[in-house]
Image (cartoon, rainbow, N blue to C red):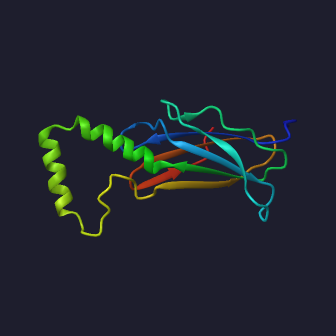
Amino acid sequence: MSTRTTASVSTHVLDTSRGRPAGGVAVRLSARSGREAHWQALGGSTTDADGRCKDLPALPEGTTHVRLDFAVEPYFESTADTESTADTESTAQKRAEAQQDAPANRDSGPGAFFPEVAITFAVVPGEHYHVPLLLNPFGYSVYRGS
């Protein structure tokens, strides 16, 4: 049995559309001590080139629920900008044709369908929670890792 009085949290983000870690994703950490308690913002971090946040703030004693907020839209906008500068003329032409065929109500920006991802989970003292986010422009998946 652990003698630690609080839980700890880590995360990383993988971009499944590119098959790579998602570097540069802003992550905010919040905690509360009970279902009815107010969220306390603890701070945040940004994923490194390996898609990991290695410096998330510690959880306060008595934490029962944690929320990780991932700002994914800026990440996808930046990867779209990077990819568009690497496009060949042929690829750029194909993209232009695909955009013409897209529904009229579709946002013309490169962003993401889910601009933010908020993951809320319960914790118990002494446990470590690693919460990976698998991400693509039109969906995401999350699980408790090890």
- Horizontal and vertical percent position of residue 88: 16, 37
- Horizontal and vertical percent position of residue 77: 38, 46
Up the image or down, 96 lies above or below 56; here it is below
- Please identify the quadrant where the C terminus is shown: top right
Q: 106 left or right of 12? A: left
Up the image or down, 93 lies above or below 82; here it is below
Q: 99 left or right of 3? A: left
Up the image or down, 34 lies above or below 7; here it is below
Residue visible at 73% across and 51% down in the picture: 31
Residue visible at 87% across and 35% down in the picture: 3
User: Between 76 and 51, which is closer to the camera in this rendering?
Assistant: 76
Q: 29 left or right of 35? A: left
Residue visible at 39% across and 56% down in the picture: 138
Residue 26 in which image quadrant: top right
User: Between 121 and 27, which is closer to the camera in this rendering?
Assistant: 27
User: Between 26 and 134, which is closer to the camera in this rendering?
Assistant: 26
- Horizontal and vertical percent position of residue 79: 36, 41
- Horizontal and vertical percent position of residue 4: 84, 37
- Please identify the quadrant where the N terminus is shown: top right
Residue 44 in which image quadrant: top right
Q: How many marks?
A: 0
